[in-house]
Amino acid sequence: MSEFWNKVYSSDDSFFGDEPSSFALLCYKEFQKNDVKRILELGCGQGRDTFFFASKGIEVYTIDSSKVAVDALSKLAIEKNLPIHAMTFDARTDLPFDDNYFDAVYSHMFYNMRFTCEEISMLFKEVNRILKNRGLHFFSVRSDHDASCKKGEKVTDKIYDTVMKKTVNITGDCIKNTRSILRSGIHKTSVQISTRPGDNQIHQKQL
């Protein structure tokens, strides 16, 4: 996966644009309501949401598998003197952060990358571990109701390759597994999900 994104980001220094995503704008309102000061962003890419959050005074830790993206983001963060800590990291392993460290964990379409159900379950456990008590987990995903569902080259029953990026339909057993994981730690993690393209609100689901 990192080779794919390294190639994409090497050929275009603003692949998804420079403006923050609509999901980031919605989440920032929730950050303000909940006095969020420190977040982890999973799958930052070239940092359009990273820079937005940091420009608002939020301390942002962020990881991405693409060294090309992280190196460029880190350089720009230093130039802009923003509170951003970026690292190249494969999220299929335990997250390199202490327990109870973040006010919130944020990601935009990160869980749509090529993860197995087991890897997604592990990630949710890790997110739960690094969040503070009453911490928040904000993420956007596509669903099996999305127009792009099952489009492109089939890789497995739940994964299809598209021209722009690799996506996975997070449905069925994967969702059931994450629900069972979060029930034991729900006092710590409130999950916010946006699954519909063009949405103008956050859909909250208590898993």
Image (cartoon, helix red, strand yellow):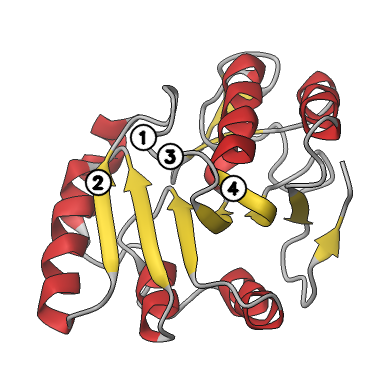
> Label 1: few (<14), some or many (≥20) within 10 Å?
few
> Label 2: few (<14), some or many (≥20) within 10 Å?
some
Q: Does 124 sit above or below residue 132? A: above
Q: Would you say the residues marked 3 and 4 are in contact, meaning their CB atoms lie under 8 Å apart?
A: no
Look at the numbered disc 4 and give the secondary structure of its residue: strand
The x, y position of residue 177, in whole percent, is: 79, 22
- Tell me how many marks there are: 4
Q: Does 179 sit above or below residue 27? A: above
Q: Would you say the residues marked 3 and 1 are in contact, meaning their CB atoms lie under 8 Å apart?
A: no
Q: Give the spatial CA distance, label 2 vs label 4.
A: 19 Å
Give whichever of discs 2 and 3 has the lower sequence position. Answer: 2
Q: Give the spatial CA distance, label 3 vs label 4.
A: 9 Å
Q: Quadrant of the N terminus?
A: top left
> Label 3: few (<14), some or many (≥20) within 10 Å?
few
The x, y position of residue 42, in whole percent, is: 46, 48
Q: Quadrant of residue 198?
A: bottom right
Residue 131: tell me if it is visible: yes
**Label 3 sits on residue:** 98
What residue appears at the point 57 percent right and 50 percent down from the top-left corner?
109
Q: Give the spatial CA distance, label 2 vs label 1.
A: 10 Å
Q: Tell me the number on the disc at residue 87.
A: 2
Q: Tell me the number on the disc at residue 131.
A: 4
Q: Tell me the number on the disc at residue 96.
A: 1
Q: Would you say the residues marked 2 and 1 are in contact, meaning their CB atoms lie under 8 Å apart?
A: yes
Q: Quadrant of residue 74?
A: bottom left
